[in-house]
Amino acid sequence: MDLCRAAPEVHANTTSEPLYDVPTAVIVVLSVFYGSVSVIAVLGNGLVLWILCTSRRMRTTMNYFIGNLAVADIIIGVFSIPFQFQSALLQRWNLADFMCPTSEFFATLSVSSNTIAAAIRSSGE
């Protein structure tokens, strides 16, 4: 289901009822979990980038690929996890219309970048 276009007026069904009811306890637990994952992804990968940028000894070709993975993971943690989680939980897109394709673009960009970097890493050395 494309949650970016899940507005009630798009469907033949004219009800504004959600597809399913999510208990408050589940919302709280999932919000804490996804929020923690997002924060840890940004902080942990930020630490990796900081180490790569400040330590001259760490500037190797392989570590540039690791830095690329860290940037891609930060993008996922900032632009994808929070927005996709809220749309799945609320069963609709509550943000500005341009944010939906932007979020999908960054998610696709990060996955593609990770895949290409992994392929290069495995073919090297």
Image (cartoon, helix red, strand yellow):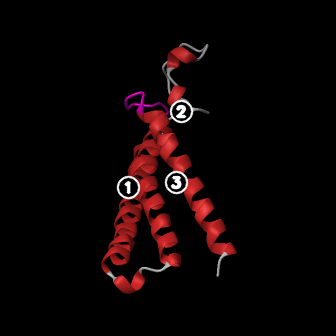
Marker disc for residue 4: none
Q: Secondary structure at mark 2?
A: helix
The segment highlighted magenta reads 91-98
Q: Secondary structure at mark 1?
A: helix
Q: Is residue 58 left or right of residue 66?
A: left
94 above or below 73?
above
Asked if residue 95 is among those painted magenta in the image, a careful observer would answer: yes
Q: Residue 54 appears at what percent x and percent y?
A: 30, 78
Q: Quadrant of residue 77?
A: bottom left
Closer to the camera in the image, 16 or 88 = 88
Which residue position is annotated with label 3?
110
Is 18 covered by the magenta stretch?
A: no
Q: Residues within 10 Å of mark 1 (few under 14, many from 20)?
A: some
Q: Earlier in the sequence, mark 3 or mark 1?
A: 1
According to the picture, the residue beneath numbered tag 1 turns out to be 35
Q: Residue at x 45, y 31 (%)?
A: 93
The answer to which of 88 and 116 lies nearer the viewer is 116
Residue to which mark 2 is pinned: 3
Front residue (pair 65, 111)? 65
Q: CA distance from mark 1 to mark 2?
A: 20 Å
Residue visible at 47% across and 59% down in the picture: 72
Sequence order check: which comes first, mark 1 or mark 2?
A: 2
Q: Is residue 114 above or below residue 52?
A: above
- Give how far apart the Cα atoms at labels 2 and 3 are: 20 Å
- Name the residue type under label 2: Leu
Rate crowding at label 2 as few (under 14), some (14 to 19) or many (20 or more) other CA atoms within 10 Å: some
Q: Callout 3: few (<14), some (14-19), or many (20+) C-alpha neighbours within 10 Å?
A: many
Whole-percent x, y for residue 43 in the image: 34, 66
- The type of residue carrying mark 3 is Ser
Q: Are marks 2 and 3 in contact (CB under 8 Å)?
A: no
